[in-house]
Image (cartoon, rainbow, N blue to C red):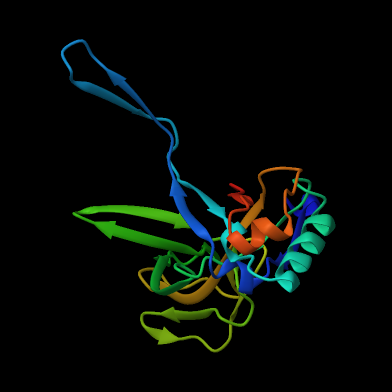
Amino acid sequence: MADDFHEVQFPTDISYESSGGPEFSTEVIELGSGHERRNQNWTYARQRWNVGYGVREKGQLDSLRAFFYARKGRAYGFRFKDHDDYQATGEELGTGDGSETEFQLIKTYSSGGESYERKITKPVSGTVTIYIDSVEQASGWSVDTTTGIVTFSSPPTSGEVITADFDFDIPVRFESDYLPVNLSSYQARAADVILLELKS
């Protein structure tokens, strides 16, 4: 993804009023009896947003157009802040085994005894705090803000629990190579400008 991804964030004043969220792909087969069979095509959700709702004035329209030109439509991915879900606190990354030094940032969603683990690849620089057995680690580790991998200079001891707090962006691209905008559309907040998550 590195060669076709720009480590820049979509304008936050526009993304603040975007509409969207996670999307799965499920095939539903209805049987003659009326019962259903559901086949899950995707193990992990893909996020989708319409950012056209956030374009409300000429300055924002100009900013969107410039950003679209710089990404060359669908050609280059970029960072997007989902203002409804951009922080993680006390996320367990794993348990030390005395040899492993790399741990992936994740965010876990739990409900009704079920959990969903989301891989975080675009943490925001300067927001990551790492803990071992609930004790903050001021040094001895680094984080790659382009992959979300935390690397320790020395492997955590066997049984030690690694947790993290952080803010994160989401890697996305424009859905279309065409940007249909005009004055009447942004005043009515009716322009559809769709962003799709890039899966790693």
- Asked whether residue 148 is in view, the answer is no
Question: Front-most of 149 and 101?
Answer: 149
Q: At which x and y percent is residue 4?
A: 78, 50
Q: State the residue lying farthest toward the left.
A: 33
**Image quadrant in which you'd find residue 6:** bottom right
Q: Is residue 140 left or right of residue 58?
A: left
Q: Is residue 70 left or right of residue 140?
A: right
Q: Is 102 located above or below residue 140 in the figure? A: above
Q: Is residue 55 left or right of residue 59?
A: left
Q: At which x and y percent is residue 189?
A: 58, 60
- The structure residue drawn at horizontal position 81% and vertical position 51%, both measured from the top left corner, is 3
Q: Is 200 located above or below residue 27 in the figure? A: below
Q: State the residue lying farthest toward the top.
A: 32
- The structure residue drawn at horizontal position 30% and vertical position 54%, both measured from the top left corner, is 115
Q: Is 51 located above or below residue 161 in the figure? A: above
- Asked whether residue 136 is in view, the answer is yes
Question: Front-most of 165 and 10?
Answer: 10
- The structure residue drawn at horizontal position 65% and vertical position 56%, both measured from the top left corner, is 185
